Image: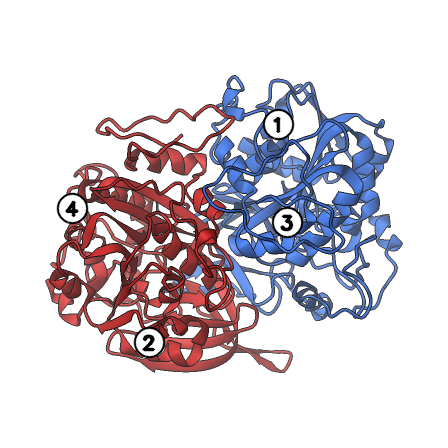
Chain colours: A red, B blue
Amino acid sequence: MPSRRRRLLSPHHRLASPPLSLATQRLGTSRRSRINGGWRRRKWLDGGDAAAAGKPLPPCCVKARAAAPESEAKCHATVVSGWFTEPRSRGGKTSKVQYYNNPMWPGEAHSLKVEKILYQGKSPYQEVLVFESSTYGKVLVLDGIVQLTDKDECAYQEMITHLPLCSIPSPKKVLVIGGGDGGVLREICRHGSVESIDICEIDQLVIDVCKDFFPDLAVGFKDPRVRLHVGDAVEFLRNAPEGTYDAIIVDSSDPIGPAQELVEKPFFDTIARALRPGGVLCNQAESMWLHTHLIQDMLSICRETFKGSVHYAWTSVPTYPSGVIGFLLCAKEGPPVNFLIPANPIEKLEGAMEAGREIRFYNSEMHRAAFVLPTFARKELEAYCTTTENEQPEETAAEPLKIAIMPNSEILTAS
Amino acid sequence: MPSRRRRLLSPHHRLASPPLSLATQRLGTSRRSRINGGWRRRKWLDGGDAAAAGKPLPPCCVKARAAAPESEAKCHATVVSGWFTEPRSRGGKTSKVQYYNNPMWPGEAHSLKVEKILYQGKSPYQEVLVFESSTYGKVLVLDGIVQLTDKDECAYQEMITHLPLCSIPSPKKVLVIGGGDGGVLREICRHGSVESIDICEIDQLVIDVCKDFFPDLAVGFKDPRVRLHVGDAVEFLRNAPEGTYDAIIVDSSDPIGPAQELVEKPFFDTIARALRPGGVLCNQAESMWLHTHLIQDMLSICRETFKGSVHYAWTSVPTYPSGVIGFLLCAKEGPPVNFLIPANPIEKLEGAMEAGREIRFYNSEMHRAAFVLPTFARKELEAYCTTTENEQPEETAAEPLKIAIMPNSEILTAS
């Protein structure tokens, strides 16, 4: 999981980013964006229609622009935007408090109380911090952004894994991009049909730290089906034989700075190439409360790229901004995939519910519920989704909600 | 909505609370508990089995006990637990920041950046604060606890209202307990079948402030069907004729201190008495991430009291602790109520989707999804729910999850 915050690309990728004017760029962002010094960000939408010049910037981009002065500021690595609170004394005791705030969700911050710092270190890619929190168990922080906590990692790891793997029968070859903590591997291993799991993670330090401090996550590395590749994910994908994987899970870094590419069309093209026909992608994809416009762009690119069904799902993760995180589910053209109803229900897989540790969050009903959107998100996102012929909207006693279809859309909207 | 944080009872109720030892009590709590000076809390479970002496305190109660020293501390009204950050200067500008933390969700805090204080005042019951936040619009704070924000109030108001009102055909008489901001009234008014709406709110100041600063919420007071009663909700309920209401919505204060009664069996008995047979209650009911044990107790009491179906539902509200809030849905013995599938779908009610302002969050699929629980919550809560005969579990391609039924349970668990 942590690697979605981590740089997945080699440092030389930095140089590939041409500086663009802040006033005209659109920003690729992720749940918890890292602040990348003075690096400029590239326009990341390739082929989208909403980026047309002259249109007013949507609120999420206005938000993103707030990052600019931040990137120049001399901030403590773990705390930004002036909300740092130094450890201070209260009642004679030292109370260590860490505040997390980020220009991608300006004006709000979530804080966790630190009981004990367990590890601090620095890799060529990022700062790594592990602490024991007072109520969320151990916490992994990369470049100042909370990646996971013992208490709620289950929601993220289980959903990002089983949403794709339970949507296709008998997945055999799976690739994880990022995921250096091992949590996604742990979840994939519940699927007995899986024969090989490639994982491409750039930062050996994160793997080592997680093996030391998060054994319940890193247990995923122990499975004999796992092949670890420490390196650049884009490079790895380029070298992967075409049509290799049944499923690719992108547990990826923030698309600001060097990992910018991971939300651009060429990256999704590389993913699509590596998938077999009818293969599926699951990519973490922002909060519907904070960044619907960015999600629209990702959906729009993926509709062009994958041709099969494309959907947005979401789930509750208390320690992520706005308390939710979303997932982009895409099927490559080929045998149709109905993401909305698990074709490969986890409850029917022998031993899957208990493998390693019991399943805490995911179940087949949560799978279906994850695709149900609040009305505001339905209106903003569903027109960007595509539904295959065999996907039936869920039965309901209600009339389908009427949704204005985007003028250029030829898609079906789930009711 | 705010009154769930507000005192609904007259101040004399304070005196009714016998001081109990902290070591033996169980605490009634709510999303954002107020800190009530040195008031002691009463054991609030009446008839529950889990409070048996000698059992180790569950984690949520251990958490609650952390409130004890806090209640003695001299804290700024809006900020507690040592996480107050005074307005401070950064880059030459005054940056006002407010941190919210509460002993009921210790070890974490959510913060909103303040653009401008719009109102500060004090009623006989509580402190009232309204500020413009930088990204969540206007915020209502009572006794230091965020009640609502412009951005996400839709999720709470719409779900607490339509979950009960869409579960029964043609609701006619509705009672709101609390709800002084008018948001729940606004939502009830979408239902053309409703003939009368009683609202019992103790704090006139909150009503007045919301009419001034939250016109989009307080619009609910303008409907001619609304009858406002400013006073003690428990007293009001005692005087209500038996079997009056089709639905009662408790948008209530925190059950610590004087509002303790609102989660005790006698209060639910009074509610049940005021409902017609087959009438329904919707009560805000904590976060499944933070207080499953307290939710278990509420479910347990309500099973005894209402005899009809009893369920727990949840939804996403970013500015509430853990980013979610739950609802207790109970039907009084009588014509069976199937909460899981809307019998009165809002999409079929003429003009309901647009009345006043358009519906932003709720829809019939969100209604159904709200009752789908993550596996951990399913295991911890579903055994405390009751299902009527006409409630069918949702169809799913998956096998039902096997759940250990509590020894004393004769209920069905939804699969």
Q: Where in the figure is residue B24, as x and y percent of width and height?
A: 81, 67
| Side of A105 where B269 appears, left or right | right
Q: Quote the CA–CA distance across marks 3 and 4.
A: 47 Å
Q: Quadrant of residue B44?
A: bottom right
> Image point 76% across, 53% down: which residue?
B408
Q: Where is mark 4, residue-wise?
A: A46
Image quadrant holding the C terminus of chain B, namely: top right
Q: Quote the CA–CA distance across marks 1 and 4.
A: 45 Å
Point out the frontmost of discs 1 and 3: 3
- Under circle 2, the secondary element is helix
Q: In which quarter of the image is residue B108?
A: bottom right
Q: Where in the figure is residue A412, as x and y percent of width and height?
A: 30, 29
Along the viewing direction, whichever of B31 and A18 lies nearer the viewer: B31
Residue type at mark 4 is Asp
Query: Of label 4 and label 2, which has the lower sequence position?
Result: 4
Q: Where is mark 1, residue-wise?
A: B188
Looking at the rendered structure, whether the residues under marks 2 and 1 are on a common chain is answered as no
- Residue B386 appears in the picture as rendered: yes
Q: Quote the CA–CA distance across marks 2 and 1.
A: 53 Å
Looking at the rendered structure, whether the residues under marks 3 and 2 are on a common chain is answered as no
Point out the frontmost of discs 3 and 4: 3
Question: Mark 3 packing: few (<14 Cα in 10 Å), some, or many (20+)?
Answer: many
Along the viewing direction, whichever of A383 and B254 lies nearer the viewer: A383
Q: Where is mark 2, residue-wise?
A: A207
- Under circle 1, the secondary element is helix
Residue type at mark 2 is Ile
| Side of B285 where A249 appears, left or right | left
